[in-house]
Amino acid sequence: MDISQFCDKMTELYKSRKSETNLKKYRLAAGLSQSELAEVSGVPVRTIQQYEQRVKNINAAKAESVIALSKALECPIEMLMEV
């Protein structure tokens, strides 16, 4: 496989990746902005942004943060985890 084929394959894989995180899905379903979720949960808005952009892994988050987010979104903790 040459470099252009590799790049094409990686682009294809990247685009096929799940577009929304579970956190974003539940936040939107709750009708909350990132700022509103931050206010209700006590989790910094920048941290929420990083989880939603997959810059930070929510699976490695502090338990307190995930619990606060799940309570604010009224969903089970495990629903926010990424597989």
Image: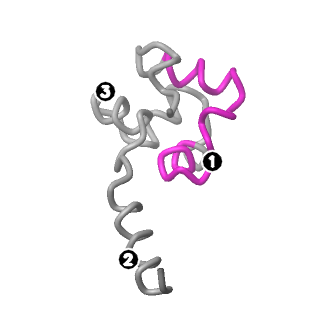
Point 46% across, 42% down: residue: 35
Mark 3 highlights which residue?
30
**Magenta span includes 52:** yes
User: Which secondary structure is most common in the magenta stretch?
Assistant: helix
* Residue 56's disc number: 1
Point 41% across, 33% down: residue: 22
Measured in 3D between alpha carbons, the distance from the residue under mark 1 to the one under mark 3, in whole angstroms, is 22 Å
Point 38% across, 52% down: residue: 17
Mark 2 highlights which residue?
8
Say if mark 1 contacts mark 3, CB within 8 Å: no
Q: Give percent across and percent down for residue 76.
A: 46, 13
Amino acid type of the residue that numbered disc 2 sits on in the rendered structure: Asp
**Of helix, strand and loop, which one carries label 2?**
helix
Q: Give percent across and percent down for residue 83.
A: 50, 33
Amino acid type of the residue that numbered disc 3 sits on in the rendered structure: Ala
In the image shown, does 73 or 82 lie closer to the viewer?
A: 82
**Magenta span includes 53:** yes
Amino acid type of the residue that numbered disc 1 sits on in the rendered structure: Lys
Q: Give percent across and percent down for residue 41.
A: 54, 26
Measured in 3D between alpha carbons, the distance from the residue under mark 2 to the one under mark 1, in whole angstroms, is 26 Å
**Of helix, strand and loop, which one carries label 1?**
loop
Q: What's drawn in magenta, residue-wise? A: 48-71
